[in-house]
Amino acid sequence: MSKQGGQIQPIRSLEDALNRCQTLGMRVSRQRRFILELLWEAKEHLSAREIYDYLNQEGKNIGHTSVYQNLEALSNQGIIECVERCDGRLYGHISDSHSHVNCLDTRQIMDIHLELPPELLEKVEQQTGIKITDYRIDFFGYQQSDKPRLN
């Protein structure tokens, strides 16, 4: 694996993902490349079914089993992100540390990059005795509209 200073290089692009596959000895099949390309183009996390439907609508002609097997292999090797939800798994491309915004209306999960104030991180460290080196936050909410929501 490509290492810098003894650490594995992060996957920041489709090219990095393809290179990591090759470094790990994973064959970069036509189907695997289609899945990786789609996940890097997508602005959200997708279910296996959505990936299958999208690729076949685009004429890629890929089977259910192939989609599931490739997603499993890619997520097990840390090449793509797998988010477990009560109604199934969603997949997305790996990026630098990030948090998620979960839309309760559309069920989308979107990546968001934010940096917490150092004072907040220090407070967490003081309360727990653990040095924070990374973090992820899950936000949940509804789409904003001009009209207030009545529940």
Image (tube, rainbow, N blue to C red):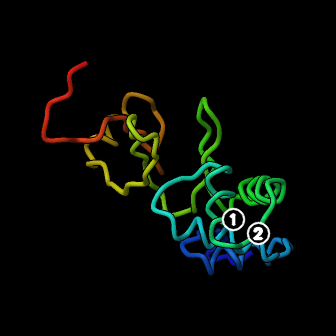
Number of numbered discs visible in the structure rendering = 2
Measuring 32% from the left and 41% from the top, which residue is drawn there?
122
Quarter occupied by residue 105: top left
Residue 147, percent from left and from top: 13, 35
Q: Earlier in the sequence, mark 1 or mark 2?
A: 1
Q: Nearer the viewer, residue 3 or 77?
A: 77
Residue tagged by mark 1?
Answer: 56
Measuring 34% from the left and 42% from the top, which residue is drawn there?
121
Quarter occupied by residue 65: bottom right
Q: Which element carries disc 1, helix, strand or loop? A: helix
Measuring 64% from the left and 42% from the top, which residue is drawn there?
89
Q: Which element carries disc 2, helix, strand or loop? A: loop
Residue tagged by mark 2?
Answer: 61
Q: Estimate the spatial distance between the alpha carbons at disc 1 and disc 2, rounded to whole Å.
A: 5 Å
> Amino acid under label 2?
Asn
Q: Alpha-carbon neighbours of circle 1 within 10 Å: few (<14), some, or many (≥20)?
A: few
> Amino acid under label 1?
Asn
Q: 2 above or below 149?
A: below
Measuring 48% from the left and 37% from the top, which residue is drawn there?
130
Q: Alpha-carbon neighbours of circle 2 within 10 Å: few (<14), some, or many (≥20)?
A: few
Q: 90 above or below 44?
A: above
Residue 32, percent from left and from top: 76, 70
In the rendered image, the quadrant that contains the N terminus is: bottom right
Residue 42, percent from left and from top: 51, 64
Asked if the residue at tag 2 contacts the one at tag 1, i.e. Cβ–Cβ closer than 8 Å, the answer is yes
Q: Nearer the viewer, residue 79 or 125?
A: 79
